[in-house]
Amino acid sequence: MAEVESIKPPASTRSIVIKVVIALALGIGIMLLPRPVNLPPEGQRLLGLLIAVVFLWVSEAVPIGATALIAAAGMILLKIQTAQAAWAPFASPAVMFVLMIIMFGVVLNEVGLANRLMYYLLKIAGTKVKRLSLILAIGCTMTSTVFHDATITVIMVFAFVPVFMAMGMKPGQGHKLPMFFMLLIPLAASAGGFGTLLGGGRCPLAVEILQKFSNGNLSIGFLEYIVIAFPISILTAIATWAILWIFIRPEEKELVGVSLENPGPMSNAEKGILVIFIITFILWFMGDLTGWHYSVPAAFAILGFCAPGWINFRTICDKFPWESWIVFGAGVSLGNTMLDSGAGRFLAEVFLPLLSGKPMFVVYYGMGFFGSFLSSMMSNSAAVALMLPIMLPMAEMMHLSPKVVTMIAPISTSFIMLVIGCPPTIIAYSTGYFTQKQFIKIAVVWAMFLLLICVLSMLVYWPIIGFS
């Protein structure tokens, strides 16, 4: 990955102090409010800490990585979590998987496979920004319905970064073109994760919770799931491109100065690493048969890259964006604590009953918004695990189909509003081509609009196929 060379002037000491004081005031204010009966003391302290941390992240008062470490330390200091519980998520299977996926990107870039991929992409899609970006958005979304969205993101991000560097557009200089693409890739990838049961852990988890809730009487099969969800993912792909094109359309009409020269025959390192990539994908697909966690094939792949000498592990570590990985670890830690402390359940118990008796559009959109909100602060699987045990009993009381309510969870948790919400956005953020403020301005609009599209699809398309 290219080094981040920001030309943004450093914030003044006065500005930093003011932002930190505001963050502390917000956090302490939440902790001092009268505590509701159904909110445990630890949950109230966590909500105060969370408000302070999110404000520091959004305002960028201090480096995002430093704030991430403070988040975990704050949970220990405020006696919300034990030291073991606060720090363990930084090395959780999901976080370690993200670490290795980002390492894949470094490898792709260093051995030349990223440039080769870009050559073929430009050869097919051309260098016209509008056409290229539309094809890219649809491609990222469609492939993410089958592959992990983080994998798709890291491949495409590392393919595009050298192009922008060659055009003289370095990170931190405020160029709209790279910001457009670096936002498009992760959002389009995230928007496709719900398309099939293979797209992400939240999808089979939702089906599993439905089965447990109904004592095995209700389920959603593999092909049934595809018929229900995949057509909607096509709409979210196009909508993602349209939203970004409207709000941050680049001035450039074409990628200029980009070489389309044939990269020539593949080197032995490229061939070897490509073979290992293919084997790794096959092992991921065979996960149900092998029983291996998806981090296991990834770890063996890293070993396979380095053992023959195709790339030096020290090079991978030197090029790795460690700050982004730490931030993702903090997000997982905060998400786990939302569950453990009761803060997440409290939010669900307060918000979801407000939907009772409302029109069906409001009910679906409200449930979807809650899923998106939760997923912005914790992993989407954790958000599904939190919301469905509360939403499914509500569905019975409101005479809603449990299967319909179940499907709302994996779809809505695909749309996040904070950088920490999912691995794809963390990976793209690590390039330095956009700030958290810029991300939030786009992501909130994106999430709200895609929820609208999905809810309308639920109300129109699902009854047509007999799913309502």
Image (spheres, rainbow, N blue to C red):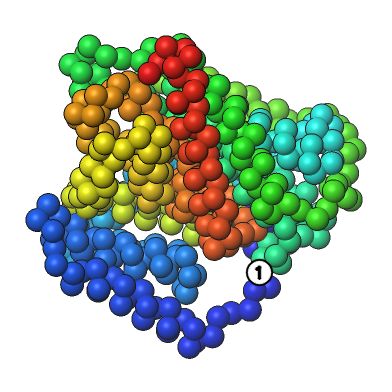
Quarter of the view holding residue 386: top left
Q: What amino acid type should be assigned to the residue bearing mark 1?
A: Ser
Q: Position of residue 19 (x, y in %)?
A: 43, 78
320 up-or-down from 391: above or below: below
383 up-or-down from 393: above or below: below
Residue at screen point 64% across, 63% down:
4
Q: Which residue ends up furthest to the bottom in the rendered image?
A: 14
Q: Position of residue 314 (x, y in %)?
A: 57, 52
Residue at screen point 15% across, 55% down:
39
Residue at screen point 36% across, 74% down:
23
Quarter of the view holding residue 468: top left
Which of 188 and 172 lies nearest the eye of the viewer? 188
Q: Is residue 421 visible?
A: yes
Quarter of the view holding residue 111: top right
10 Å crowding of disc 1: few (<14), some (14-19), many (20+): some
Look at mark 1 in the image and give the residue it sits on. 6
Q: Position of residue 251 (x, y in %)?
A: 80, 55
Residue at screen point 70% across, 65% down:
174
Which of 80 and 352 lies nearest the eye of the viewer? 352
Q: Is residue 312 visible?
A: no
Q: Position of residue 32 (x, y in %)?
A: 18, 72
Q: Which residue ends up furthest to the left in the rendered image?
A: 37
Number of marks in picture: 1
Left or right of residue 69: residue 196: right
Dot 1 falls on a residue whose secondary structure is: loop
254 up-or-down from 78: above or below: above
Left or right of residue 263: residue 53: left
